[in-house]
Image (spheres, rainbow, N blue to C red):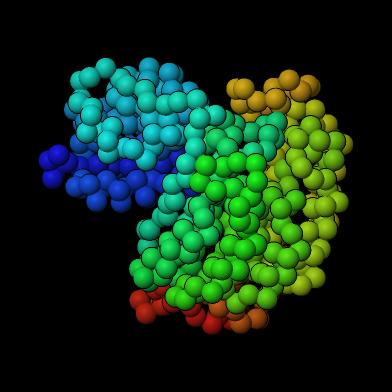
Amino acid sequence: MSQNKTVAFHTLGCKLNYSETSTLSRMLEADGFEKREFEEAADVYVINTCSVTENADKECRQIVRRIQRRSPESMVVITGCYAQLKPKEIAEIDGVDLVLGAAEKFNLTKHLQEFTKGDSTRICSCDIEDVAGFHSSYSLNDRTRTFLKVQDGCDYNCSFCTIPLARGHSRSDSIAGVVDNVRELAGTGTREIVLTGINLGDFGKGYHGGRQKEENFYDLVQELDKVEGIDRFRISSIEPNLLSNEIIEFVAGSEKFMPHFHIPLQSGSDKILGAMRRRYRRDLYADRVASIKKLMPHCCIGVDVIVGFPSESDDDFKETFDFLHGLDVSYFHVFTYSERANTLALDIKPVVPIPVRHERNKALRNLSYQKMQYFTAQHEGQVRPVLFESAEKNGMMEGYTDNYIKVQSPYRAEWVNSIVDWQL
Ligand code: SF4
């Protein structure tokens, strides 16, 4: 293969997708490609798609059109969750050359070698049931914070979610494999690692998934705590039913695992949680929050919540609102429910009108803002360690405290990628 083929990437969706794109990009560079920015001309464009993004197909189409206008001779490859879910639809987009499903994503170089621009569009994807194997990945933008994928797929079947259809069964790296990656990252000067997965608390089902866990998340965090050279770890998101007391106690006692959890709630109504097929009820959630706050009163807790799920009445929403209002959490990520093909939620009636969904979203976003203000005010005057990042914006730099409070300071080059004691 010619040494000077160029490639550019575009990522839609979650942190997992970003870490996978980052790994794909390093893989291709190792295979002789030169990386370009997406806005530049390149021989190959790779779009890593997401199934959760609303209008994923529209977005994909727009991006392909942009590429075609700029460089009609370039090869266009679409991969990621949306490519797994709707390969045919994507292949029909004018200008798309290759569609790579979940199992083929990491064979990108091989597919590029076998394909010539001008061949008819090729779809390389298999049934998601047959997708096995774990590919670890991490993002490596600046050295400050890295997202390290340690788990993929999900064995739950929440009624609104397409992720199991797009990413397959729960499977994961081994603890030894994660430790190796963490050591490698420590060698690059990385200060903070965010452990990332689709259902992270389900870590331990091995490379090919399976019923039994071979290892577990608690063992993983204990081992990572011993690795030299990394200052901070965060747990990106963990299901409340998998966040055990032993994990909470461990984080409370660890100097490296930051006092910060992100725990999906999705609804504060038990009726809706049942319809969503979630594996806990609101009391368990409240209990998890209380356990965390008892040991770590300064801990930041983020919440995912979905509004407008089918059959969510005004009263059900009020229950969610009141529950969150009374809960000692710090911020929410609010998602407006939207219909997804092949999900069980499509059969649940009545559907919530779109304007009502948006009103509910707004109400919770306002509450989230107040929660974050309150959480920040609670720590005013305290001195907390801040890890500053490299980006400079209008002469300012940003960083996060251990408990995830965002701090801004006039830019000082010597603070980049350093942990500084900072008075809030
Ligand atoms: S736990 Fe539920 S929402 Fe999360 S990925 Fe699995 S099925 Fe989807």
Q: Position of residue 336 (x, y in %)?
A: 66, 36
**Image location (x, y in percent) of residue 407:** 54, 70
Q: Quadrant of the C terminus?
A: bottom right
* Vertical comparison of 179 with 311: above or below: below
Q: Position of residue 128 (x, y in %)?
A: 52, 29
Picture residue at 41% right of the left edge, 42% below the top:
11
Between 90 and 177, the one nearer to me in the picture: 177
Total marks shown come to 0
424 relative to 99 in the view: left or right: right
Name the foreground residue: 406 vs 329. 329
Horizontally, is 344 left or right of 147 in the view?
right
- Specify the quadrant of the image occupied by residue 339: top right
**Residue 373 can be seen in this image:** no
* Residue at x-position 63% and y-position 56%: 216
- Residue found 38% across the figure and 65% down from its top: 184
Residue placed at 37% from the left, 40% from the top?
106
User: Does any portion of residue 23 appear in the rendered image?
Assistant: yes
Asked if 79 appears above or below 325 in the picture, the reply is: above
Residue 208's x, y, as percent?
Answer: 52, 42
